[in-house]
Image (cartoon, rainbow, N blue to C red):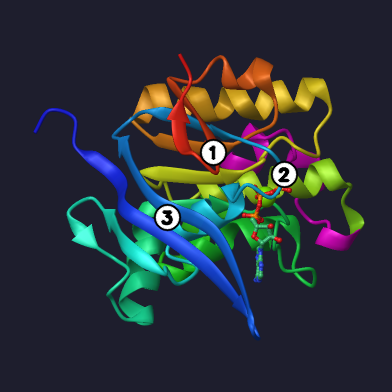
Amino acid sequence: MNNPSVIACQSLGKTYQDGDLSVPVLHNLDLTIPAGATVGIMGASGSGKSTLLHLLGGLDSLTTGAVFWGETRIDTLGENARCRLRNQHLGFIYQLHHLLPELTALENVMLPLLLAKQSQVNAIKEGMNLLAAVGLSHRFQHKIGELSGGERQRTAIARALVNKPRCILADEPTGNLDRENAEHVFSLMLNLSRDFGLSVVMVTHDAYLADQLDIVYDLSVDGLIPRT
Ligand SMILES: Nc1ncnc2c1ncn2[C@@H]1O[C@H](COP(=O)(O)OP(=O)(O)OP(=O)(O)O)[C@@H](O)[C@H]1O
Ligand SMILES: [Mg+2]
């Protein structure tokens, strides 16, 4: 295959069950993310963008359908096997960034490497490189609670990139950033995609940034509609 998919879903559906209440969110979605592609997901608040990203990242259970990372179907794997694969292949940037508050910025960024059993020396070196790339060299020893919202978001971006994943799933990665920093981290991701064949799936409300991506989908009750 010339352009194998990094992530794909087939007939994906999600209905949240809240006691007696069924909340249908996603219905029968098919999506293929080609290797090296940059893909935007846009849509109204509540349309299910975060839900879709969580399902593609194997972070929540599907109601219907299947999710694949490369050739591997991951929704039927056990939790441990899925976590191991995720650590090797995916970087996730959450809408609420989920950094560990008691650790410093550098320790947060090192964590995926230490989980992958890399040496402390290498984790420090790579962690510092990534923090420099997102413009945070001067804050590496700060605890997360001592960082601004935008600095936390940039730390989360560095953490997602540090294990050199094949694909980044990013939920509004530039949502908390001012224009200059938004464009800075956005071009960082585009450069990584171009230089290393990294795929990027990005939820964004920012039409200016979305215009620079290879493919943009609108998510609504009608499903995922590619923008032309
Ligand atoms: N755990 C849950 N239980 C019940 N309903 C949920 C749950 N999580 C999300 N929902 C509902 O699913 C819908 C989609 O939520 P989701 O967070 O995916 O939207 P979104 O498109 O990311 O919105 P936003 O742009 O505001 O981040 C919303 O209506 C939300 O209320
Ligand atoms: Mg969301």
| Residue ID for mark 3 | 56
Q: Nearer the viewer, mark 3 or mark 1?
A: 1
**Ligand 1 lies in which image quarter?**
bottom right
Mark 1: secondary structure: strand
Q: Which sits in the foreground, 41 or 21?
A: 21
Q: Earlier in the sequence, mark 3 or mark 1?
A: 3
For residue 83, above or below residue 173: below
Left or right of 76 in this view: 122: right
Quadrant assignment, res 68: bottom left
Q: Which mark is residue 219?
A: 1
Q: Earlier in the sequence, mark 3 or mark 2?
A: 2
User: Is residue 214 among the parts visible in the rendering?
Assistant: yes
What is the magenta range?
A: 128-145
Mark 2 C-beta closer than 8 Å to ligand 1:
yes
Mark 2: secondary structure: loop
Tell me what residue is drawn at x 69 percent, y 50 percent: 46
Estimate the x, y position of residue 73 in percent, counting from the top left.
Answer: 23, 63
Q: Is residue 214 magenta?
A: no
